[in-house]
Image (tube, helix red, strand yellow):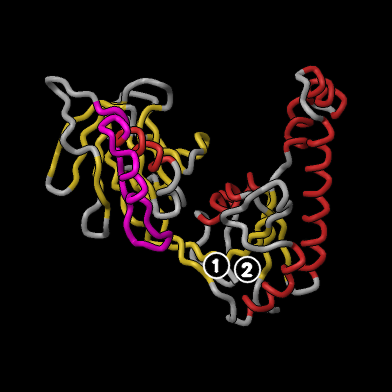
Amino acid sequence: MNDCTFVLVTRKTRLQELVERFNSWAQAKFYLEHNQVNVQDYLDESVRYQSQVQEAESILRTLGRFQRLERSMLASYQFGKTDVVVVIGQDGLVANTLKYLDRQPLIAINPDPKRWDGVLLPFELAQLKEVVTRTTKGKSSSKNITLAQASTNDGQVIYAVNDLFIGPKSHTSARYCIRWNNIEEVQSSSGIIVSTGLGSSGWLQSIVTGANGVVGQVNQAQKEIFDWSDERLKFAVREPFPSQTTGTQCVYGEIRGNEPLGLESFMPENGVIFSDGIEDDFIQFNSGCLATINVADKQGILITN
């Protein structure tokens, strides 16, 4: 165990974010009460989460080198190859952490099972020491997580664990040229969603369900869900608009290693590619930018047992 560093990834609670927003707990409390929100629920959540974090830190410090990392620091932190990463949930924090890793094992802890279902949170705090010990000895079970990758001709790169959105930053039409499977087409739409297996039951599923519902085939949408480890992606164009200069032939497809998705932006400004539903986590996609979307050259490893 002494050869690795245990990195504990945490997030701010709703209460902490409100205190930062209003500069004091008194102002935050007044805001909640004025809006008839249960103040005690915010307090209970924050107290429990902080106690779980403190206990996890105490456990990990006894096992070896330790580093605590708040969510906002993920993008700038350099993870080592032998790091073992522990995340104190929710699911979104697990996904957000995975895209900054390259096969370092991630152990996800559900801090409050009564509050969070935790699809990506297989463990509770009482299991932490045992799971960490098994993981460092190579005796844990794990699940490979395929990531999506977008790279541009000007050197920008972004990864996604669930999905990528390519389109306008605001609620306007996206204009671009799409190139896939020997098809090249100029399009105008509300943007494109590219989904991994992990994300295939989320945003992609809602788009496909809506489209199938229009033609009376809602039940067919379940067939679009695929395994987290599948080395493929699926894309769907949202609300493609047919006109004399824009087409709707290439609106859905699968991306594999030998069949990437190519995109050229025709948007003078506000074109973006953002990751996992986080609008602040984006790269620019404006006129002249060429983007290639494919299966990432790295994977996430989620410990499952």
Amino acid found under the numbered disc labelled 1: Gln
Residue 212 in the image: state x and y as whole percent: 29, 36
Work out which quarter of the rendered image holds the C terminus and state it.
bottom right
Quadrant in which residue 59 is drawn: bottom right
The furthest residue to the top: 34
**Callout 2 environment at 10 Å: few (<14), some (14 to 19), or many (20+)?**
many
Whole-percent x and y of residue 233? Answer: 33, 52
Magenta residues, start to end: 213-240
Label 1: few (<14), some (14–19) or many (≥20) C-alpha neighbours in 10 Å: some
**Could you tell whether 195 is left or right of 85 in the image?**
left
Q: How far apart are marks 1 and 2 (CA)?
A: 6 Å
204 is within the stretch colored magenta: no
Say whether disc 1 or disc 2 marks the residue closer to the N-terminus: 2
In the drawing, does residue 225 fall left or right of residue 189?
right
Label 1–label 2 contact, CB within 8 A: yes
Magenta-drawn stretch contains 224: yes
Helix, strand or loop at mark 1: loop
Q: In this view, does 245 lie to the left or right of 301?
A: left
Q: Mark 1 points at which residue?
A: 104
Q: Quadrant of residue 67?
A: bottom right
Residue placed most toward the observer, 143 or 290: 143
Quick check: can you spot residue 266?
no
- According to the picture, the residue beneath numbered tag 2 turns out to be 84
Answer whether residue 303 is visible to the viewer in this image.
Answer: yes
Residue 226, above or below 84: above
Look at 41% across and 21% down and name the residue there: 171
